[in-house]
Image (cartoon, helix red, strand yellow):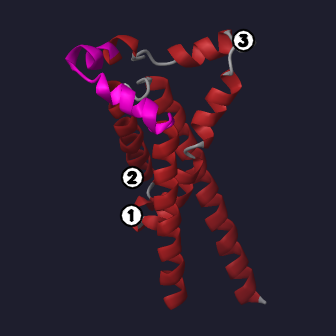
Amino acid sequence: MKNGRFQRKYVRIIFIIYLLIVIKVIIFKYPLEQLRQIAATWEKGVILEGLDTANFTLFKTIRMYIDYSYMLNSFENLVGNVVVFIPFGFLLPYVLPWARNFFVMLLNAFLFVLGIEVFQLFSAFGAFDVDDILLNCVGAVLGYIAYLIFEGVKRRRKKKGREN
């Protein structure tokens, strides 16, 4: 029992570090001085510009990356948006036992990603893109599938161990 709590504590720490890294990489990706310059321009007009540059059309960015795959770093952007959230879907069920439910995990991933995107929309620290929300949630789902597979393998090994 103590070993389980000990492991859960470390998984929580790893999950928190992961979330901080995601926030750093996605929101605070620019050098501190550049972030200060962006923040210095914050006023109603500049913030509203975020609405003009935002993508609210599902699959618009994904389609653009596919259409211009020979010119852009499309593969890195598409795959990166998925891969960065795989740990979310894998670790969250260990951190929050009630998040072992697929829909609870997906809702948590969606709300976290939406929070990041809305912050980018109004802060000018990035660009709001509905396709990022989709791709990030796909990553969380893949992580959750990996969690289910991992837990299934653990259960089978435990069951085999008891049989021997």
Q: Which residues are magenta?
A: 27-49
Q: Is residue 29 magenta?
A: yes
In percent of the image, x 53 and y 52: which residue is there? Answer: 89
- Picture residue at 29% right of the left edge, 16% below the top: 46
Instruction: Label the magenta part by its dominant secondary structure.
Output: helix
Provide the residue designation for mark 3: 71
The answer to whether residue 54 is above or below residue 28 is above
Q: Which residue does the numbered mark 1 point to in the structure image? A: 98
Looking at the image, is mark 1 or mark 3 nearer the viewer? 3
Q: CA distance from mark 1 to mark 2?
A: 7 Å
User: Going 51% across and 82% down the picture, which residue do you hit?
Assistant: 6
User: What's the amino acid at mark 3?
Assistant: Met
Residue nearest the observer in this picture, 10 or 93: 10
Residue at 53% x, 60% y: name it: 91
Please say if the residues under marks 1 and 2 sit with CB atoms less than 8 Å apart: yes
At label 2, which amino acid type do we have? Val
Q: Is residue 124 visible?
A: yes
Describe the element under mark 1 as helix, strand or loop: helix
- Tell me, yes or no, whether the highlighted magenta stretch contains residue 104: no
**x, y percent for residue 146:** 63, 55
The quadrant of the rendering that contains the C terminus is: bottom right
